[in-house]
Image (tube, grey):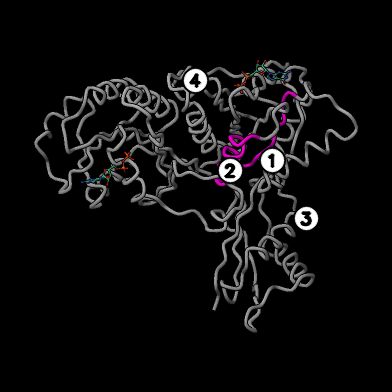
Amino acid sequence: MMRKPVVAVVGRPNVGKSTFFNKVAGKRISIVEDTPGVTRDRIYVDAEWLNYKFTMIDTGGIEPDSKDVILSQMREQAQIAIDTADVILFMIDGKSAYTTGDEEIALMLQRAGKPVILTVNKVDNALPNEFYYDYYNLGLGEPFLISAINVLGIGDLLDEIVQYFPKPSATEEEDETIHVAVIGKPNAGKSSLINSILGEQRVIVSEIAGTTRDAIDTPFQYNKDDYVFIDTAGIRRKSRVNESIEKYSILRALTAIERSDVCLLVLDASEGVTEQDKKIAGYAHEAGKGVIIVVNKWDLIEKDNYTFNQFEKLVRNELAYLQYAPILFVSAVTKQRLFKLLDTIKHVSTECAKRISTGLLNDVLNEAVMLTQPPSDKGKRLKIYYMTQASVKPPTFILFVNDQELAHFSYVRYIENFLRKNFDFVGTPIRFIVREKK
Ligand code: GDP
Ligand code: GDP
């Protein structure tokens, strides 16, 4: 499985990032988009160009409240991009000369040691404008002139972007390392959890390589398997812009999720499930990653015979779309159940990559159809001819049917539950693609 590269778009408000974004936006499978209860805001899109699939993140999805915070927000955006992106797209406004703020950001990006593409938007004919030669002074090489509105120059720009991605064929070989993103709101105990696990004698922490990206990645071994913790907390710095801390921590979580196989959604037991938890959980679900719900600080909770069940019920209610995710009650402080957590990570990563043979799948499908008849509408009944597993991570199934319109969400959900009853798929989302077969 190739990990999807991340492209971060950095730029002042109003340079046209969202407009550009919407032109490039791909579409996720509709059943995923329809997930009830997933909180959504469009700060990222899945995009595809030539044979490359990538995720593009709008680091500027934050409305500045006053002029003087714009620059500090841009520094923050640039830092996120530097920490997490494979390619950085720095967008400026071609309608006027670049600003001193642009200069400062350009300097920051120059030093990052990552591919940076200078993009000048609002050049509505995509031809060199009066400022053209000045752009070279930003020290970021050749400027790409585009018009997001007229969709001009975007193809050349995308060509340039994908050049920096690993070649699809070169990365075909399996990387067995399990990438674990530790996500959750600030103070949930993410760093403590990672430190407690790495401090155990049965866990062997490897050397950390010196690149920027690896600074937030910690490789380790457990039971002879290779893992990498992707820490979203360790790189958190004090933000000058208090109101946007939440947004930035979500952005960081987002890039970590994209690079992971399994996400640990860390909740603070003393706070229950918050809105921010729900948002982050929604991203992990939509990205199709394995998810484990880790209720941390369990040591703080006064318990009786009902506590476990009550808490589990609460989590299941609040995070209804994550029914498949195992819930573990742990404590980074007392180290309760940390090995259970490691074993669960291994188990879930196997489940995400599980393949079921077409023969076996159709035996189960036949049984499902026999027990609950497919729905009908205006005298026409849904027929499912057969199903096959198209891919893993997440397991994705194609249902071949007589009429797509008849394949209601609720019946597909029934099939999903039936599959889970037979084949588990613990901790992984499952996707369906419905195709008509004449
Ligand atoms: P963001 O704040 O960077 O996301 O910027 P927006 O995408 O919201 O765009 C800000 C304004 O610039 C909007 O009024 C857009 O219509 C306009 N805009 C965006 N792209 C272009 C373009 O290529 N040419 C022109 N003339 N205007 C543009
Ligand atoms: P992060 O922001 O998610 O990385 O959270 P930290 O690891 O920095 O932890 C935030 C606070 O919660 C710190 O004061 C920790 O000591 C405390 N904490 C973390 N895990 C636990 C736990 O399992 N039990 C208790 N009682 N406190 C914890």
Residue, far bottom: 379
Element type at mark 1 = helix
Q: How far is disc 2 from disc 1 in space, using C-alphas? A: 18 Å
Q: Is residue 210 magenta?
A: no
> Mark 3 or mark 1, which has the lower sequence index?
1
Between 372 and 114, the one lying in front of the other is: 372
Ligand 1, seen in the image, is in the quarter at: top left
Ligand 2 neighbours mark 2 (CB distance < 8 Å) = no
Between 368 and 77, the one lying in front of the other is: 77
Element type at mark 4 = helix
- Depth-wise, is mark 2 or mark 1 nearer the camera? 2
Q: Residue at x 74, y 54 (%)?
A: 420
Q: What residue is disc 1 on? A: 348
Q: Is residue 281 magenta?
A: yes
Q: Residue type at mark 1?
A: Val
Q: Residue at x 60, y 45 (%)?
A: 285
Q: What residue is disc 3 on? A: 421
Identify the mark at residue 215; answer none if there is no mark: 4
Q: Residue type at mark 4?
A: Ala
Identify the mark at residue 282; answer none if there is no mark: 2
Between 158 and 299, the one lying in front of the other is: 299
Q: Residue at x 16, y 24 (%)?
A: 137
> Mark 4 or mark 3, which has the lower sequence index?
4
On the question of residue 177 being in view, the answer is: no
Q: How far is disc 2 from disc 3 in space, using C-alphas? A: 23 Å
Q: Residue type at mark 2?
A: Gly
